[in-house]
Image (tube, grey):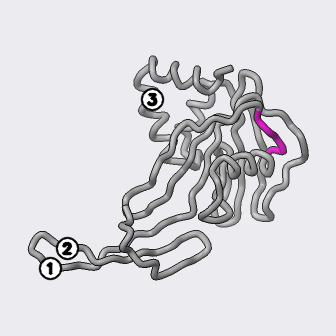
Amino acid sequence: MIPKSAKCVFKGLFFQTYQWQQKQFDGTYATFEAVKRRPTVQIIATVGDKIILLKEEQPNYGKFTSIIGGYFNSFDDKPRDTALRELKEELGMVPRKLELWKIDYYSKKVVWPTHYYFARDCKKVCEPHLDPGERIKPFLVTFDEFIEETSKPDFRNKFFADEMFRLKQDKKVLAKLKKMIFKK
């Protein structure tokens, strides 16, 4: 966590670096540092009884598979607005219902909140509007295929993939996730 007394010593497009003095157990002080990254959203979107995944390509990242997502345009953006914007930009779709599932943080030294949403019963309302550095091809999968895709080497979000791996170990928890994703 970044204490309120920390001073921002660098502001970039995606990162802000903070430093502060912290008292040590022997009474001395040391300089500590942490980075705040612009927050992101990740969206598990459905159409009927299928989940939408993306085959993507970006300069410097190559080809990969992912769920819908992206970063906030600024540190002050609202997570829900960002999720809706990403759905429209990447797919040209809006959900019947958008529900926050959870918020994950990368670490204490790299403060990077990721807001995970369920976007249920998405419908196409316009053409996608991709960034110049994006190539995106959506495809539909069953829940079981979704879980398998997250374990493949080309799945981009490794933290999410790790969580899906842990969930696979408990069939009851996995069934609960499936119910949450497709909740009416």
As drawn, is 132 to the left or to the right of 25? right
Nearer-the-camera pick, 47 or 132: 47
Q: Report helix, strand or loop for mark 1.
A: loop
Magenta-colored span? 91-95
Which residue is label 3 attached to? 167
Q: CA distance from mark 1 to mark 2?
A: 6 Å
How many other residues sit within 10 Å of disc 2, few (<14), some (14-19) or many (≥20)? few
Nearer-the-camera pick, 85 or 47: 85
**CB atoms of marks 1 and 3 within 8 Å:** no
Which disc is residue 23 wearing? 2
Q: Amino acid at mark 1?
A: Thr
What percent of the width, then of the height, locates residue 162? 45, 41
Observer-side mark, 1 or 3, equals 1
N-term-proximal mark, 3 vs 2: 2
Q: Report helix, strand or loop for mark 3.
A: helix
Q: CA distance from mark 1 to mark 3?
A: 44 Å
What percent of the width, then of the height, locates residue 68? 68, 45
State which quadrant residue 2 falls in.
bottom left
Nearer-the-camera pick, 130 or 121: 121
Q: Amino acid at mark 3?
A: Leu
Q: CA distance from mark 3 to mark 2?
A: 40 Å
> Is residue 2 shown above or below 177?
below
How many other residues sit within 10 Å of disc 3, few (<14), some (14-19) or many (≥20)? some
Q: Which quarter of the rendered picture does the N terminus lie within? A: bottom left
**CB atoms of marks 1 and 2 within 8 Å:** yes
Q: Amino acid at mark 2?
A: Lys
Q: Is residue 76 magenta?
A: no
Which residue appears farthest toward the front when viewing the image?
Answer: 4
